Image: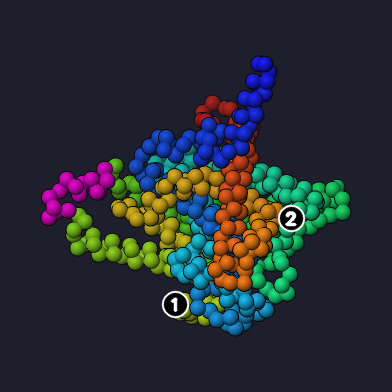
Amino acid sequence: MASKLNSFQLVLKAGANLLPSFLNFGSSNDPPLNNRPDSNVIHQTRYTSLDGLRGVAAFCVVTYHIMYFWDISIWFGNGVPYRAASLCVDMHICEARYNQRFRVLQLPPVRILIMGPAAVAIFFIISGFVLTQRPLRLARDQQWDSVLIALSSATFRRPIRLFLPLFVATFITMLLTYMNLMDDGLDGEGCLIATIEPAFPVARGLRVQFVHWLQVVWRSLNVWDWTAYFPPYDPHLWTITAELRASMALFLATLMLCRLRSWVRLALIWSFIVYSVLWFRWDMGLFFCGMLLAETSQINNNRTSTTSIAQLGEELPLHQNWWSSPLFLSSRLLLYLLLLISLYLLSTPMACTAFTPGYSILAYVAPKSLSPSFNNHKLQLHQCVGAVLFVSLLVHWTSLNPIRPIFNTKIAQYLGRISYGLYIVHGPSLHLFGYRLFPVMWNLTGRDLSVTYAIGSLLAYSISMLAIVWLADLFHRGIDEPSVRLARRLEKKVLCREEGLIRM
């Protein structure tokens, strides 16, 4: 009887571990968001919101990859006629499907929800900020030994943290590919209805498939080739190699600049940004922008006391309140204007900018070589500028910031915690079951009318997104978190223990 009870308890425990962590906090090493200790005001309001922004950006990337496989029109802004769209991409687009496009999603700022490239730009900026924030803070305090330890530790653990989850995910995808379970997502209408990804490489034998996977993994580790590599088992993982390459360059730059005066460090970071942009290395430029924000945030922290300005304002008489002063009102209006500009730039269409109402001027403001073009995998100028401006406002807008509460919500923080798992698992998940759901739902609702087409698409999208979030949660707890802990344990195992040299 006792053995049966123990078996039943084990089954219940295993079932509880399969639940998402927001339904079962006991299965995760992360405490519930409402139970996390408040370390300080700055951390909770500024840096925590970056975690939430990263989670929302990952959600937008998933939405983008769901949509672009069934609706080519997400590449275009609202108001682009069918003939102009066909000329922009130089392909035969299905006119009937194009006319059924979701025009609301093409409007700014709603369009940001389906702007995957803009979300990737935000990823790179946040990574640059997070990787350099602690070393730069220690450098400002002139804790040179601690700076060296922080950089050494981060450099050692970064490849393990990035690539170990990738190895596991692509290995599982390789097995699913060998079993011929990955769907290409096309319905064979004879014309372009969506973005086409390369077919999964199915080998004749498991050994050949495994060797091919090893070759793909080895190629992904090639940081010496700056050409973007799209792994055939998940093309969306091209950013991981870029992350590793940029991280190593960022650590080197931090080591180079940490002992310099602050104004010299700022000037050199700016020069690195300009240098990267002039060589069309948007990834490096965005990482250095994150480093710049990390440095300026440290300067801003030194000027800000722990008592908030709002609290000081409440203690003053009404005629002396800071929020009623003309200077504050004008500066606040300027911040809101910059916020609107950032949202406008983040919503820049990826194709036919010159034919898009409200955006045609951008095609002439930027050099032609930097203008958005169809199927161009380089990050675009307008979206990058919008991303830098948006993250800057999130970091530096210290008083009554209207966007921080959005990214400090529990759902945004949860998405931020599983963001890496969400990014890694969503591609194979869509090919495994997500893209198959759309024809099934359209068969149920019909797709001849725009309304029935939209209902079927919304049902398929909702089911796919819920399943992907669940799988990402499992991947985060089962693969991602253990990878982080393994990197730390491995570092401790191999560290030199000489007294006075290493302090853990």
Mark 2 crowd level (few <14, some 14–19, many ≥20, 10 Å Cα): many
Furthest toward the right, the residue is: 204
Colouring chosen for the image of the structure: rainbow
| Magenta stretch bounds | 307-321
Closer to the camera in the image, 387 or 20: 20
Kind of residue sitting beneath label 1: Gly
Q: Is residue 145 visible?
A: no
Residues at discs 2 and 1 in contact (Cβ within 8 Å): no
> Residue visible at 68% across and 73% down?
192
Q: Helix, strand or loop at disc 2?
A: loop
Q: Is residue 158 magenta?
A: no
Dominant SS in magenta: helix
Q: Tell whether 112 sits left or right of 438.
A: left
**Residue 246 drawn at (x, y percent):** 58, 54
**Which marked residue is nearer to the observer: mark 2 or mark 1?**
2
Disc 2 from disc 1: Cα separation = 40 Å
Quadrant of residue 200 within the rendered picture: bottom right
Identify the residue under disc 2. 182
Identify the residue under disc 1. 358
Sequence-wise first label, 2 or 1: 2
Q: Tell whether 82 sits left or right of 413.
A: right
> Residue visible at 61% across and 49% down?
467
> Residue visible at 47% across and 79% down?
357
Look at the picture and state if 187 lies above or below 425. Answer: below
**Residue 155 drawn at (x, y percent):** 58, 44
Q: Tell whether 213 sits left or right of 393.
A: right
Q: Helix, strand or loop at disc 1?
A: loop
